[in-house]
Image (cartoon, rainbow, N blue to C red):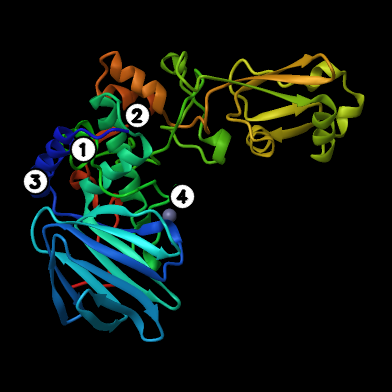
Amino acid sequence: MKIRRSVVIGSVVLWIITMGASAQAIRIGLYNHEPIRTATIYFTSGEYMVNSGERKIGTYGSGDILFAAMNEQGISLHSLMGHLGSFDLLEFRSLGLNASFRIRPLLPALESRAYDDDLMLVSHGDFMNLINELDFDKYIAGVLEAEVGPGAEEEFYKAHALLTRTYLLKNFDKHKEEGFSLCDGVDCQAYHGRARYNPAIARAVFETTGEVVADYHYRLITAVYHSNSGGETQRAADVWLEDTDYLQAVIDPYSLHQEHAKWYDTIAYGDWKTYLLDHGMASVKKIPEELLYIQQRHRKKYFVLDQDSLLMTTIRKDWGFKSTFFNMFPEVDNKIVIWGKGYGHGVGLSQEGAMYMAKQGFSYKDILKFYFFNIRIMDYEDLPQSSVPDLEYDLPGSG
Ligand SMILES: [Zn+2]
């Protein structure tokens, strides 16, 4: 993608505004648990004080470079001037509002990424944990850039920002034992550094700052989404066996005619029959062939044959299908053709459906209320104390 200079400058200006609005910080584990042994840190803007506990190491700014490598004494830190010492913990604390840096892991060699705000390096035996401590909303914008990308409507980004913020708060303790809240991989939410290319993302996050999605009982919801529902979302209970009143099936015309609305596959009839037998469906032997083809007008939880049943989610996983929402038809040469709908688990918000709703003029609140039942859109500070996690860190580098 080509980056226009004006876009970059626009988002920088917005960050200056947003910094004042929210002081809450979040810690994110970078490079999704890669065992990083050496890394170069480039200071790209603003000024940083580098400390190890009480010990001040120095002040660094735009253009400076530090090099960190694991050795027996911990993290060995070098500048271009020489060795600065070995440490268990290093904190890079930004002194101004808009400080940023870039990291390039060398061992293993990984792509370099740019980040806002603070950095901590924590010695962890043979490798170091890299932790980015940054403003909530800057993190949310980074996630939107990684998870959604450019080109969507602002109301869609707002809806997604609320889900991302809700997920972040609900899962604040997910990686707490490792010293951070969330990692940057898809098991949490993809985060590849600072949002740089989308002023609409920055505006959407800023304009909804603090807003989250709660259920009828004022508890943060399980903020799930998928690529495309195929025209009907799935009850959470049909996928994860846990029922919630806000994650129910919704007839979703907005997801039809979108990029991932349909898919197609073929499999061998013999392989399908063997698969069913291998999965305990003994009735395959006595049932007419036409009943072995899965047919769904609405999304089903199970494929049922006589007394036997198999979870649709198991079938999807085992065959690598894009969704559980499909129909099978006999084809020549002992093949089965599969016409599928949607992409992903189908629970919660359909990203493509929500994007289309935003294009049709629906607000982010309309969009969220379409995909989630009986929800409340509110500031997280107005939630009862029991619904919000303790937003404090003990380790490392607290105080
Ligand atoms: Zn994670």
Q: Amino acid at mark 3?
A: Ile
SS for dot 1: helix
In the image, which disc is placed on residue 16? 3
Mark 3: C-beta under 8 Å from nearest atom of ligand 1: no
Query: In the drawing, does residue 174 fall left or right of residue 238?
Result: left
Can residue 165 be seen in this snapshot?
yes
Q: Which quadrant, please, contains the C terminus?
A: bottom left
Query: In the drawing, does residue 299 fall left or right of residue 195?
Result: right
Mark 1: C-beta under 8 Å from nearest atom of ligand 1: no
Q: Characterize the local packing of mark 3: few (<14), some (14-19) or many (20 or more) Cα atoms within 10 angstroms.
A: few
Query: In the drawing, does residue 248 fall left or right of residue 361?
Result: right
Query: Where is residue 55, by image quadrant?
Result: bottom left
Q: Earlier in the sequence, mark 3 or mark 4?
A: 3
Q: Nearer the viewer, mark 3 or mark 4?
A: 3
Q: Amino acid at mark 4?
A: Asp
Q: Which quadrant, please, contains the N terminus?
A: top left
**Which residue occupies the foreground of this view, 238 or 128?**
128
Q: Nearer the viewer, mark 2 or mark 1?
A: 1
- For marks 2 and 3, give the CA distance: 36 Å
Q: Characterize the local packing of mark 2: few (<14), some (14-19) or many (20 or more) Cα atoms within 10 angstroms.
A: few
Q: Nearer the viewer, mark 3 or mark 1?
A: 3
- For marks 3 and 1, give the CA distance: 13 Å
Residue, disc 2: 374
In the image, which disc is placed on residue 187? 4
| Residue at horizontal 51 percent and vertical 20 percent from the top | 230
